[in-house]
Image (cartoon, helix red, strand yellow):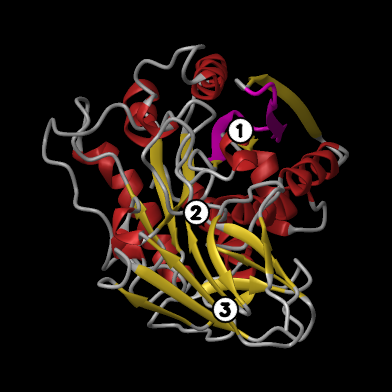
């Protein structure tokens, strides 16, 4: 039988083909442009013809987060709509770290990705649909280095300023699936949570803060290899126009509550990170974040507080990151939401693992938690 064919010349595609023998391929992940970061992959296999594929992605000990590969199963789809999981195994000693994906497609074409992709075309559909909703205003915040728009959607009649922004790290596609779920709540006139939040808040939504990295198939950086979530102290038009545009818009409105949405390669659960260690930290300020965290933990079993990042010591916050910078700059209740690439071992879903659908459901829980948090903010 003929060899399979592997392609990645499309939106967010990323793979290097080292060799192909029948239905077996040896592959590698390309680094982000002008950067050493590498972890995201997204490619198409054709000529599968019902055969069992054996796809070996090699050199992963040199990836950005080697700790992300043990216990991880690759995402696979034959229709680019439903993304399930393909059985995968990790061997740190084979070819400098190899993830072997085994999958027998029912059709001639199958797609594989680190997480279910969120294309720029879907992004534009999301923005257009939301912008056409009653009470929603579209705002062009700026332009990326590749010439793409930085999109913002604004809604609500209240004075409490809420900023939701995602995909500073483009390979963390969980974040834009979360945004899709959030916008479904916020733009639905029959949704009680969205309706109440719009009455009480002015909400600013940036569904994709890094369009260039997203289209280029990067894990963590923009067009010139810059990690945007290390640019918030001193963003520049030359290196990080995305951050500069968003932060300038925040300066215009002020920020009371902010959530920066991400994905974490190694930790297999959803969790929040706060702003401990900022110069202006007070227990009262910190308690606003912790109270929101407790509410979300109570509302959904897909969130937890046992696992997460270590808290910074007093004065030890990294002020180049958005969550700490926004908390300090505006006195905001600011946080980073992290979602997994792997399945949640406490609440497993073997067919899909952590999935776009769960990202969207978590968004609704996050917004419902915000509404509850607002009810008690002066208590």
Q: Is residue 45 shown left or right of residue 38? A: right
As measured in the structure, the alpha-carbon distance from the residue carrying label 2 to the one carrying label 3 is 16 Å
Please say if 92 is above or below 230: below
Q: Gap between marks 3 and 1, in whole Å?
A: 27 Å
Sooner in the amino-acid sequence: mark 2 or mark 3: 2
Which numbered dot is residue 212? 1
Q: Are marks 2 and 3 in contact (CB under 8 Å)?
A: no
Locate residue 26 relative to residue 35 in the image: left or right: right
In front: 7, or 198? 7
Magenta stretch? 146-165
Q: Judge whether residue 100 can be spotted in this image.
A: yes
Asked whether residue 164 is drawn in magenta, I would say yes
Q: Residue 40 shows which numbered tag?
A: 2
Q: Which residue is drawn at 60% across and 58% down?
A: 42
Q: Mark 3 points at which residue?
A: 85
Residue 171 vertical position relative to residue 285 in the rendered view, above or below: below
Foreground pick, 126 / 362: 126
Q: Can residue 207 be seen in this view?
A: no
Residue for point 42% across, 17% down: 235
Q: Position of residue 203 (x, y in %)?
A: 63, 36
Q: Is residue 53 above or below residue 336?
A: below
Task: Provide residue 56's location: percent of width, then percent of height.
Answer: 47, 71
């Amino acid at each position: 039988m003929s060899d399979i064919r592997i392609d990645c010349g499309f939106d967010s595609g990323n793979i290097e083909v080292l060799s192909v023998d029948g239905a077996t391929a040896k592959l590698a992940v390309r680094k982000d442009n002008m950067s050493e970061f590498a972890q995201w992959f997204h490619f198409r296999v054709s000529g599968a013809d019902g055969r069992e594929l054996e796809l070996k992605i090699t050199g992963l000990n040199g990836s950005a987060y080697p700790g992300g590969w043990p216990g991880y199963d690759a995402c696979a789809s034959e229709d680019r709509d439903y993304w399930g999981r393909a059985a995968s195994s990790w061997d740190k000693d084979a070819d400098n770290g190899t993830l072997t994906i085994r999958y027998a497609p029912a059709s001639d074409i199958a797609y594989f990705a680190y997480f279910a992709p969120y294309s720029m075309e879907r992004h534009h559909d999301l923005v257009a649909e939301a912008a056409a909703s009653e009470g929603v205003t579209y705002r062009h915040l700026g332009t990326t280095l590749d010439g793409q728009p930085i999109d913002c959607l604004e809604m609500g009649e209240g004075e409490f300023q809420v900023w939701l922004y995602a995909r500073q790290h483009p390979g963390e596609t969980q974040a834009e699936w979360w945004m899709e779920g959030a916008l479904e709540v916020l733009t639905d006139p029959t949704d009680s949570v969205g309706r109440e939040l719009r009455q009480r808040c002015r909400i600013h939504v940036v569904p994709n803060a890094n369009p260039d990295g997203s289209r280029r198939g990067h894990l963590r950086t923009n067009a010139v290899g810059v990690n945007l979530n290390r640019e918030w102290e001193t963003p520049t038009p030359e290196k990080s126009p995305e951050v500069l545009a968003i932060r300038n818009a925040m300066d215009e409105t002020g920020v009371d509550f902010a959530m920066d949405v991400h994905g974490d390669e190694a930790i297999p659960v959803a969790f929040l990170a706060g702003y401990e260690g900022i110069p202006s930290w007070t227990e009262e300020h910190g308690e606003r974040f912790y109270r929101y965290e407790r509410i979300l933990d109570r509302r959904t079993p897909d969130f937890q507080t046992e696992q997460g990042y270590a808290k910074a010591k007093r004065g030890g916050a990294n002020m180049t990151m958005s969550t700490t910078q926004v908390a300090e700059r505006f006195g905001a209740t600011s946080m980073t939401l992290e979602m997994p690439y792997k399945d949640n071992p406490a609440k497993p879903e073997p067919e899909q693992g952590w999935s776009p659908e769960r990202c969207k459901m978590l968004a609704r829980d996050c917004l419902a938690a915000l509404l509850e948090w607002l009810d008690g903010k002066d208590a």
